[in-house]
Amino acid sequence: MNEVRPAATLDAAQWLLRSDVDWWDLVRYGPPGFDVYVRVAFAQDPAEGEDPALRRALATLATYTATPATAYAAIWEGWGGDPPPEAPRVLIPHRAMLLFTGPVEVLRDAPYLGWYGSVQGYQEPHLVWPEDRAWCLACEVDEEVEFTVGCSVDASQAMARALPGGVRRVQYGEPAPLYRNPAQP
């Protein structure tokens, strides 16, 4: 059963749309204001094309919200095939997204579930947060090195334990590489 569905309204995403936040920082770091921001490394060699780091991060983060059964995923509208599904549009400059809802545990698969109704491969969700806004995971469309989570200190420490060596603390908006260096193993 597909537990991901279009959100009823755009209300849950309004907190993202702040005029004082550059669109690039928003899609790479989520909204400002969390206690801690961490960058989480994508797996170097994900099995069968899936990145277990994102799945483990969301599983860990699900324990750091009072609303794990109700969360949201904003997916870049240009990700999937045409036509895109009917869902509220989050008008982020250069990255208009469609808003979906479901339990945290299934939002890892929100792109495929939202577009096709079933998991047919792997694609990262672009922005994910629980209803209580305890954290926000941001995975920029073009990023292949890391994704970012804004959260509490406790949640960041739990992710560091779940993903040893793959989590580093950063400042909001700090420059970070987008692409892997092919010269490095």
Image (cartoon, rainbow, N blue to C red):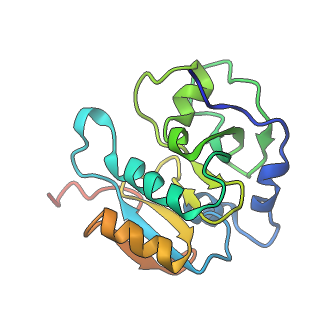
Residue in front for this viewpoint, 21 or 59: 59
Name the residue rendered at 72%, 40% in the picture: 99
Q: Position of residue 120 (x, y in %)?
A: 43, 21
Name the residue rendered at 44%, 52% in the picture: 59
Left or right relative to 124: residue 13: right
> Would residue 176 be seen by someone viewing this image from the given angle?
no
Image quadrant in which the N terminus is located? top right
The correct choice, above or below, for 47 with respect to 54 in the image is above
Name the residue rendered at 60%, 51% in the picture: 68
How many numbered marks does the figure carry?
0
Q: Position of residue 47 (x, y in %)?
A: 23, 38
Residue in front for this viewpoint, 16 or 82: 16
Left or right relative to 109: residue 65: right
Query: Residue 76 sits in which quadrant?
Result: top right
Q: Position of residue 63 (x, y in %)?
A: 51, 59
The correct choice, above or below, for 16 with respect to 72 in the image is below
The correct choice, above or below, for 77 with respect to 169 in the image is above
Residue in front for this viewpoint, 41 or 130: 130
Query: Residue 123 sits in which quadrant?
Result: top left
Q: Position of residue 20 (x, y in %)?
A: 79, 73
Image quadrant in which the C terminus is located? bottom left
Residue in front for this viewpoint, 144 or 182: 144
Left or right relative to 136: residue 176: left
> Would residue 88 be seen by someone viewing this image from the given angle?
yes
Identify the residue at the far left of this view: 185
Name the residue rendered at 26%, 67% in the picture: 164
